[in-house]
Amino acid sequence: MKKGSVTANSQEVVVPEKNADKIAKNNNLLIRNKFFVDKVAAGFSSIQVLNILFSFTGASLLFIGIVNAFRSTINTIASSATKEIANKKTISKKVIVATGLIFGFSFLFVALSISLMSHWFFAISMLVGGVCFVIHGDLFQIFVDRYMAKWKSQMFDEWMTILGIVTTIIALSISAFILDSVPISGKLIFLPFLGIVLFFGYLISFEISAFSFIFSSYLLMKIKIEFEERQGNLNLRMYSSDILNKMTEFFKNKYLFTLTLATIFSAAFQAVMNSYVGIYIYQNYKTAWLGGFLNIGVMFGLALLVALLGPMITSRISKNLGIIPMFVFGTLLMAILPLTIAYNKYLPAIIAANMLSVLGAAFIGSAHSLVASRLLNKEDKNTFYVSSGLFAIIPFLIIVVALSFVAQIYGLVELFKYVGFGIIICLFPLYFMMVIWLSKKSI
């Protein structure tokens, strides 16, 4: 192997010999900067704010729910296809950069759709942007794992994660302040040398998000790494056949089927909550407490802080108490948010419930991983993690669209009752069966 080269995942990655250490340090700095710029962009374009602005275009609750359901579905398909293609062919920085640029520009089209009051244009912009974001994120992660594995631990340590979340919270708060300060109809502001200018809060926020993602793509372009090409090609027929064969495994293996069914219900209920919670809070508390969007910023900013504690708390519970408390508390904590919204109109209580709901989702996710490791063999675990998303597409769509009809016909309060009790009724029996199987295996 030449001087200045490293090996990552059985593929030779060549760093130019001249000034190799300097180039490696520069690459690390570029990746770190990209990480923080992405966090700023995420704070200015949270999904809850997007859905609130979506409702401003005149979109019905049903339409918003359906678009969010299809967004999740298309993203799942795009992610699966992207990872398969990346396993066969060389990852090109140009593709990663291009998808990042398209995602950035999609926010400008979202802003334009609001000014045009076109919910169809908004939906298309959000769908295209979502697909590009997933492709960009997956390819970038593979790029780092494959070609920069030697420096990954230096680039993404614990402090980076904490600072990244804090950055997102600050950006979310600033975005909320801008959106509250400048109404949807715009605000005339006097600027030196320019005179009176009409500003739109959503345009300012989305421009920051758009240019952040565009700048993030520029930083990626500056990374200097040369790597050997992969010459494989994706055979669509074989890929489709392999997916169908794996999907049949879900019906043959009761462990695999039950785990996936629990994942479907959990994902569907969370998707519905992500679609409508922000809209409900904005509509009912826009003149109370901190104001419309600032209430949203505080609510979901605190939830991000709780997400930091999730892994630490779940690891301690699993060691000291086992899987059963994780399932019980996880399910109840997930259900507490929709039920609190339905039966308790006190905003601080709803904010606290949202924080607990995030913790509950962390419990459930960790418990799923533990159960999968104990009940499934190596091949079935691979099937579960790789193909469960594709297997879940149709039932996921049915559940989310059905609940969107409930929101449209009966209102959001009634919807949250369905979701809250649905989480308990649908998930508890599945987790009870898993616990029985685990106890039999341990005997």
Image: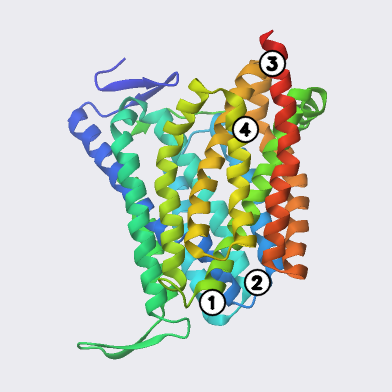
C-beta proximity under 8 Å, tags 3 and 4: no
Q: Is residue 418 above or below residue 176?
A: above
The residues bearing labels 2 and 3 have C-alpha atoms spaced at a distance of 51 Å
As shown in the figure, which amino acid type bears the numbered disc 2? Trp
Residue at the (52%, 38%) spot, across then down: 362
The amino acid type found where label 4 is placed reads Phe
Label 3 and label 4: CA atoms lie apart by 14 Å
- Which mark, by number, is residue 327? 4
**Depicted 114 relative to depicted 234: above or below:** below
Q: Label 1's element? A: helix
Kindly identify which numbered label has been placed on residue 439.
3
Q: Residue at x 76, y 29 (%)?
A: 257
Q: Nearer the viewer, mark 2 or mark 4?
A: 4
**Amino acid under disc 3:** Ser
Query: Which dot marks residue 120?
Result: 2
Q: Residues within 10 Å of mark 4 (few under 14, many from 20)?
A: many
Instruction: Mark 2: give few (<14), some (14-19) or many (20+) Cα within 10 Å.
Output: some
The percent coordinates of residue 407 (x first, y second) are 72, 65
Residues at circles 4 and 1 in contact by the CB criterion of under 8 Å: no
Real-space CA distance between mark 4 and mark 1, rounded to the nearest whole angstrom:
42 Å
Q: Is residue 355 left or right of residue 416?
A: left
Position above or below: 44 against 23: below
Residue 99 at x, y percent in the picture: 49, 52
Q: Secondary structure at mark 2?
A: helix
Relative horizontal placement of residue 252, taking residue 179 as reference (left or right): right
Of labels 1 and 3, the one closer to you: 3
Q: Secondary structure at mark 3?
A: helix
Q: Amino acid at mark 1?
A: Ile
Identify the mark nearer the N-term, 2 or 4. 2
Pointer 1 with pointer 3, Cβ within 8 A: no
What whole-number distance in Å separates the C-alpha atoms at marks 2 and 4?
Answer: 40 Å
Vertical position of residue 412 compared to residue 213: above or below: below
